[in-house]
C-alpha cells in the first residue's frame, strides 16, 4: 500500500507536504516548463504589498558557504496587478495557491488580507511579519511577541481563509512569539524566515550587498531552523510548516520528525527546480521502509 503523504492545515488539504517557499517561486509562471502542475503540495507566491515596490538597489544576492545572502527588498508588482495579471494564471492550475503578503503598518496588513480573501483561487494566506512597523519606530512586527499577536488578531478578524503566519528567527525566544501568534488566531505557522547576515569584500573593504545586510538562506541555516521548529512544535497546538535549507528528502525528514507537518523549499529550487519531486519520493520511500502508513504518524516522531 502506498503511504498517504497528504496534509490537512485548517480547511486546506494538500496532496503532498512539499511547498514552494515565498520569494523563490516568483508568481509561478517563472518556472513554466521546469516544473509540472502537481509537483508541489502548494505554492506560496512572492510577497505582495499594497503598492508596487522596486526593492533594493543591486547587488542584491551573494553566494556564501553552504548558502546565499539576499537583499531583494520584497520587490513586487503590488496587489492590484497581482490580482489582475498573476492570479488568472495561478488559479488555472490545480496546485493550491497560498499568497504571502506584508505591510509596514497593521492597517496595511488588514487591508491586504481583506482584499486577497475575496480573490478567486486564493486558498490560504501567509502573513510575513518580518517587516518593520513604521508606526513603532521601525521595530519588526515579528520580533515582539505582543506586536506579533496583535497584528495576527487584526488579520484574523477580516479573513476566513486559513491564516499562516511566517516567523522571523531573529528573536530571543521564538516559542514565545509563536504562542502569541497562536492566541491571535493563526491557523498555522511557517518558520524560519532568513537569518540576518552580511558579507564584505576584503579587497575593497566594502559590503558586497548594496543594502549592507541581507537574509541568509540555504543549508547553512538548517540546524538553526530544525531547532526552532522543534521548540515551537512543543509550545503550540497548531500546525507548523518548516523551512530553512531543505535540499533533499533527508533534510525534509528532519523537520517532519521534529514536528513540522509540511515543509517549504526555497533556495533548493535555484539549484534544481525538480527538488520537490525527489523530496516527496524520498519521504514515501522512508515511510515504506519504516512502516509509516500516514504522514501524521511520522510527524513529531523524534526518539528521545
Image (cartoon, rainbow, N blue to C red):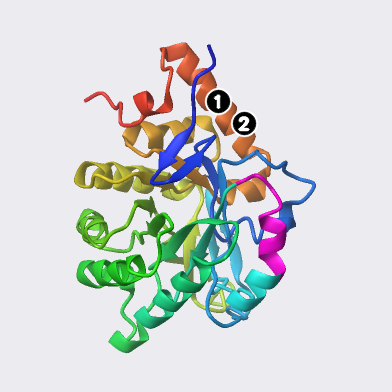
Above or below, 64 against 242 in this view is below
65 relative to 163 in the view: left or right: right
Above or below, 7 against 238 in this view is above
Quarter of the image that includes the C terminus: top left
Kindly state the secondary structure of the residue where label 2 is placed.
Answer: helix
Residue 196 % position (x, y) = 41, 65
187 or 76, which is in the foreground? 187
Give neighbour class at mark 2: few <14, some 14-19, many 20+ (Cα, 10 Å): some
- Asked if the residue under mark 2 is in contact with the one under mark 1, i.e. CB atoms within 8 Å, the reply is yes
Give neighbour class at mark 1: few <14, some 14-19, many 20+ (Cα, 10 Å): some
Residue 3 % position (x, y) = 50, 19
Residue 105 shows in the view: no
Q: Which residue is mark 2?
A: 278
Residue drawn at (35%, 42%) of the image: 226
**Residue bounds of the magenta highlight:** 85-95
Residue 258 % position (x, y) = 32, 35
Above or below, 191 against 156 in this view is above
193 or 2, which is in the foreground? 2
54 or 3, which is in the foreground? 3
C-alpha separation, residue under disc 1 versus residue under disc 2: 6 Å
Above or below, 287 against 268 in this view is above
Residue drawn at (28%, 59%) of the image: 185
15 or 211, which is in the foreground? 15
Residue 276 shows in the view: yes
The tag on residue 97 is none
Kindly state the secondary structure of the residue where label 1 is placed.
Answer: helix
Residue drawn at (32%, 63%) of the image: 170
Q: Which residue is mark 1?
A: 282
Q: Is residue 122 magenta?
A: no
Residue 146 % position (x, y) = 20, 70
Amino acid at each position: 500500500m502506498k503511504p498517504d503523504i497528504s496534509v490537512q492545515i485548517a480547511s486546506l488539504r494538500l496532496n503532498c507536504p512539499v511547498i514552494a517557499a515565498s520569494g523563490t517561486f516568483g508568481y509561478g509562471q517563472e518556472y513554466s516548463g521546469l516544473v509540472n502542475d502537481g509537483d508541489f503540495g502548494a505554492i506560496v507566491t512572492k510577497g505582495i504589498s499594497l503598492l508596487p515596490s522596486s526593492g533594493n538597489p543591486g547587488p542584491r544576492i551573494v553566494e556564501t558557504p553552504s548558502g546565499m545572502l539576499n537583499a531583494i527588498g520584497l520587490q513586487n508588482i503590488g496587489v492590484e496587478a497581482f490580482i489582475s495579471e498573476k492570479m488568472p494564471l495561478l488559479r488555472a492550475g490545480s496546485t493550491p495557491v497560498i499568497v504571502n503578503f506584508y505591510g509596514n503598518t497593521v492597517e496595511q496588513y488588514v487591508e491586504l488580507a481583506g482584499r486577497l480573501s475575496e480573490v478567486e483561487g486564493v486558498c490560504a494566506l501567509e502573513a510575513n511579519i518580518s517587516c518593520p512597523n513604521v508606526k513603532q519606530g521601525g521595530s519588526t512586527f515579528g520580533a515582539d511577541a505582543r506586536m506579533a499577536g496583535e497584528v495576527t488578531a487584526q488579520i484574523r478578524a477580516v479573513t476566513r481563509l486559513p491564516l499562516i503566519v511566517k516567523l522571523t528567527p531573529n528573536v530571543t525566544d521564538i516559542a514565545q512569539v509563536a504562542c502569541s501568534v497562536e492566541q491571535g488566531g493563526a491557523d498555522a505557522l511557517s518558520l524560519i524566515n532568513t537569518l540576518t547576515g552580511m558579507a564584505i569584500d576584503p579587497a575593497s573593504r566594502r559590503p558586497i550587498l548594496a543594502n549592507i545586510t541581507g537574509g541568509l538562506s540555504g543549508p547553512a541555516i538548517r540546524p538553526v531552523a530544525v531547532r526552532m521548529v522543534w521548540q515551537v512544535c512543543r509550545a503550540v497546538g497548531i500546525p507548523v510548516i518548516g523551512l530553512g535549507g531543505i535540499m533533499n528528502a533527508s533534510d525534509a525528514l528532519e523537520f517532519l520528525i521534529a514536528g513540522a507537518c509540511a515543509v517549504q523549499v526555497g533556495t533548493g529550487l535555484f539549484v534544481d527546480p525538480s527538488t520537490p519531486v525527489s523530496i516527496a519520493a524520498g519521504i514515501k520511500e522512508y515511510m515504506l521502509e519504516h512502516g509509516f502508513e500516514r504522514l501524521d504518524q511520522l510527524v513529531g516522531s523524534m526518539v528521545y
